[in-house]
Image: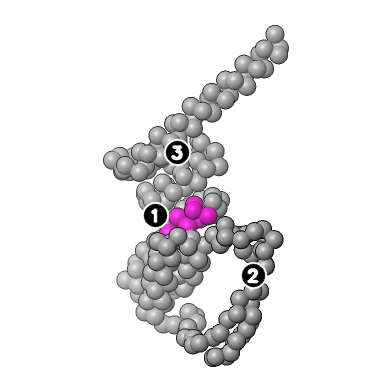
Amino acid sequence: MTMKKEEQATVTISAEYLCSHEVSELVSADSVLHYEVTLIDFTKEKPFWKMDTHEKIEACERKKHDGNLLFRAGKYWRASKKYEKAAKIIEFHHSFTDDEKHQANGLRLSCYLNNAACKLKLEDYSETSSLCTKVLELEPLNVKALYRRSQAHLKTSELEKAEADIKRALTIDPNNRVVKLVYMELKDKQREYAKYQAEIFGTMLSKMG
């Protein structure tokens, strides 16, 4: 859809879209919303492929900042999109100086980690794990990435993978309080699973007897 300044339009949004995001809690599953929109003003962004290296880094920082504000406001899906766009701006940095590459790498890792936090909130655990893995491929000792990936593994009951990440994180940072809390959660889940397995095994033996 394209609009001119001061032009009006009616925007229709179906339940299929709404039910994917945080606004789904406010409407029923079969809802269709109609919005009356007036374009008051707009600023056309420069395409990132036309930006010089300095402009790319600045644009990435702005998108990341916007994502941070949205995350703090609890708008996780929109924040995730901002982090994705921010990371994409600096995805190709062949023309960057060494200092700019170092800055861009730091920004990209930060965007991946922040996006992983969004995906956790949105219960997209597969994507959480994937984003954290991207960070760890570039920075193997990143405790935040190990911590968030372990959370995703816990949510999907991949307890062995969760334990491996948590133990690795604690080896790097033994006094990290939040990682210790996740380790306690893991131990609780392992005890529950062991109890469940014992009950299943006991039932099988009783049937055999």
Q: Secondary structure at mark 1?
A: loop
State whether residue 91 is above or below residue 47: above
Q: Nearer the viewer, residue 117 or 109?
A: 117
Quadrant where the N terminus is found in the figure: bottom right
Q: Nearer the viewer, residue 42 or 130?
A: 42
> Residue drawn at (54%, 51%), measured in percent from left and top?
123
Residue extending furthest left? Answer: 175
Identify the magenta region. Answer: 113-122
Which residue has dot 1 on it?
139
Q: Main secondary structure of the magenta part?
A: helix
Is residue 115 highlighted in magenta?
yes
Q: Secondary structure at mark 3?
A: helix
Which residue has dot 2 on it?
33
Q: Residue 206, located in which quarter of the rendered image?
A: top right
Query: Disc 3 and disc 2: Cα gap in Å?
Result: 46 Å
The amino acid on which the numbered mark 1 sits, given as a three-letter code, is: Glu
Query: Disc 2 and disc 1: Cα gap in Å?
Result: 44 Å
What crowding class fits label 3: few (fewer than 14 Cα within 10 Å), some (14-19), or many (20 or more)? few
The amino acid on which the numbered mark 2 sits, given as a three-letter code, is: Leu
> Residue drawn at (42%, 57%), measured in percent from left and top?
113
Which residue has dot 3 on it?
164
What crowding class fits label 2: few (fewer than 14 Cα within 10 Å), some (14-19), or many (20 or more)? few
> Residue drawn at (40%, 36%), measured in percent from left and top?
183
